[in-house]
Amino acid sequence: MHIREQFPALHQKVYGKPLVYLDNGATSQKPKMVLDVLQEMEGKLNGNVHRAVHYLSMQCTERYEKARVVIRDFINAASENEIIFTSGTTASLNLLAYSFGQTYVRPGDRIIVTEAEHHSNIVPWQMMCQRTGALLEVWEIDDTGALDPKKLEQILDKPGEVPRLLAITHVSNVLGIVNPLSEIIRIAHYYNVPVAVDGAQGIVHKKVDIREMDADFYAFSGHKLYGPTGTGVLYGKEKYLEEMVPWQGGGDMIETVSLRKGTTYAQLPLKFEAGTANFTGVAGLKAAVEFVNSLDAKAIEEHERKVTLKALEALGQIDGCRILGMPGTYYGQIYEKIPVFSMIIEGAHPADMATLLDKMGIAVRSGMLCAEPLLERFRVTSVLRASFALYNTLDELDFFVESLKKVLKMLR
Amino acid sequence: MTIENKQAQIVEEFSLMEDWMDKYEYLIELGKKLPPLEEASRQEKNLIRGCQSRVWLDIKREGGCLYFRADSDALITKGIVSLLVFVFSGHTPREILDADMSFIDKIGLREHLSPTRANGLLSMIQQIKMYALAASAQKPV
């Protein structure tokens, strides 16, 4: 597959062995066109955005705002005013929790999260609840990892305090199954509850059409999407962003500042972008999205589906191996699976497996994966996760499975 | 045997191993051989939490010396725990405080004791040293 040629990091050796990188759920490698842009930006086109009238500053500003348009089109947002640049999904969700909380949330209101969330889609809401006096309510998953919409309706329909927001992941970083968001959002909207989506994993594997999905907010990171670290996006419907108070104050987010009369804020989207933006990173993020756009989406999806099916079959044959999050039809909804496989294997600790696989050149993740409540739900303290990207091959999958079997022989 | 002697013995044993596979197989063996702590000692108060694996450490003081027993839910961690218990157990707080830890480097396991590893080993050493510090300030019982 010629895609691999575009990723220099994939062609290195670790401990003298060819690198097999299967920790894409944590961060992806970057294609050359992203690396070239970063070098050009840092080495040449370095002038602060939205500030000066000189050439470099104007070039940077143009690139930065062009990136906003590219990302608007990438997720089919209605306007570039709905695209806020942040440092990543976590920052996006913290911004949202603060600004949404200060604007709309009153004591006793309910904020709903699912049990399958990454800590980044739990802790900002807990902090928001502490600030506003709102209550956090949990939509529990079942043993397969799926969410029963009836339970959501029960939560939303409960008389008494107002449900104010549903925060839910597009794809859990542990389970790897795609939540049926359109249906979930339809239900939430029926009860007039806006929905905030953690798209950190989802946007990497699924085409996102934000207007079709009808999510009110959607957060994602650049570094998992073949882009630079320290870049991210918060999409928000303009009607909300327009009303929401800003999060951080400082340069770029102001209209006028007066020590006597106080400060007025800039129009969208700059109202939410205080301080010097990561314009270098954003230029790289633009290149990453252009890279993804340049690929044959159908072929990639087909390839990832093959990897998923083969992996589920091969790992399922390992004695005592249990995979969290299986695809299937639950509650009348189809749950697809992206190539993310979190495993518990009897008689072998994930940390031991990951340590030994590392020595064989294979990068996988072990531990709680920043999802302690989810692991607790399955009564485990640690899992082993192999997460594939579009550049991973079926040969790499075979090598991973064979190596895992060797490791199990050493440990069990 | 002094702490230095014990460390020298470990370094000697590891020097005979040719590649990482031998080293890890040896650690796994040590981990399997170390008797598990009984349930009563695997309590919250003895637990050193890490994202990757957990370590339980039980400390006793007898006749001016400290004695350690420990356990982990991960085998490789437990193998290294076994080395640390062997090195530190049965020595005075002073000897433990003065102990140089460079043998970990010499046997090529430094990465396991890095703060980012989050396997409880670094905290285990810190707790052993802290306990020794506290004990050295008291009179021997």
Image: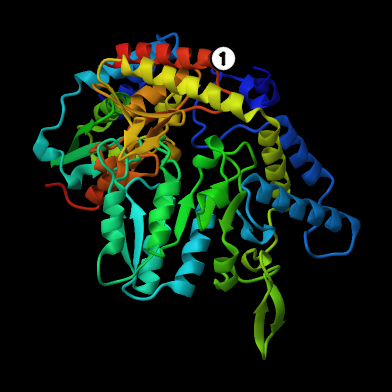
Say which quadrant the N terminus of chain A sits in: top right
List x then y, in percent, for residue A405: 35, 12
Name the one closer to the observer, A69 or A320. A69
Q: How is the image coloured?
A: rainbow
Name the one closer to the observer, B84 or A383. A383
Q: Residue under mark 1: which chain is it in?
A: A
Q: Under tag 1, what secondary structure?
A: loop
Give the answer, above or below, for where A59 lies relative to A375: below
List x then y, in percent, for residue A401: 41, 15
Residue lying at 56% horizontally and 50% vertically, measured from the top left: A210
List x then y, in percent, for residue A8: 68, 25
Q: Residue furthest bottom?
A: A260
* Three-letter code, disc 1: Gly
Residue designated by label 1: A16
From this viewpoint, is residue A271 visible?
Answer: yes
Quadrant in the rendering for residue A189:
bottom left
From this viewpoint, is residue B107 visible?
Answer: no
Residue lying at 59% horizontally and 38% vertically, measured from the top left: A225
Say which quadrant the C terminus of chain A sits in: top left
Name the one closer to the observer, A182 or A314. A182
Name the one closer to the observer, B24 or A364. A364
Task: Classify residue B51 as left or right of residue A5.
Answer: left
